[in-house]
Amino acid sequence: MGDSAVGTLTRAVAVLMVFGLAGCSAPGARYSAGYAHPHRSHETAGSTTSAREQVADLGGGSRGVASFYSGRAATGERVGSNVLTAAHRTLPFGTKVRVTNLKNGQSVTVRINDRGPFVHNRSIDLSDGAAGVIGMKGAGVAPVRMEVIR
């Protein structure tokens, strides 16, 4: 065998070994330890914490930053311009929350039907329709006050 054939054979064996070893490696963690799937409920069956207590326990009280979105909620409902719903990390589905835009005083009552937001500094995700009612669509986010009403 000539030098060029040996070199080609050596490269081919090396490539096969790399692919073979890569296939044997254990899969890495798909998500980091702090990741929470946006459509999994964080409610526990035996929870005794009321919705009002959960809002009061939000870091900084019942004030936070709202954003908005559209698409499908964890409950399967469509989220869009004609619905007044919201996503919250911990409030039970069906909870009614009054959200007031602190920049202009406009408020809307929404029903929690999804989980989120999963962005560090956001407290609630409003549906496209709810964001329009409180005048925050142009800015994309707004400082808000959240009050559980039932």
Image (tube, rainbow, N blue to C red):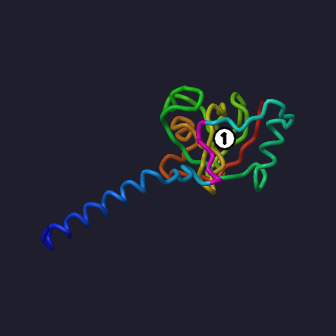
Q: Which quadrant would the C terminus be assigned to in this image?
A: top right
* Residue 107 lies in quadrant: top right
Count of labels in the image: 1
In this view, the residue in front, 47 or 106, is: 47
Drawn side of residue 105 relative to residue 2, left or right: right
Tell me: 121 left or right of 30. right
Near-viewer residue (17 or 62): 17
Position of residue 135 measured from the top left corner of the image (x, y, whole percent): 54, 45
Of all residues, the one furthest to the right in this rendering is: 48
Helix, strand or loop at mark 1? loop
- Please determine whether, in this image, residue 84 is positioned above or below residue 102: above
Residue where numbered disc 1 is placed: 88
Residue at screen point 63% across, 56% down:
121
- Report whether 86 appears left or right of 82: right
Q: Which residues are magenta?
A: 33-39
Residue 29 in percent (x, y) is at 56, 52
Mark 1 residue crowding within 10 angstroms, few (<14) / some (14–19) / many (20+)? many
- Which residue is located at x 55 percent, y 26 percent? 76
- Give, as a three-letter code, the residue at label 1: His
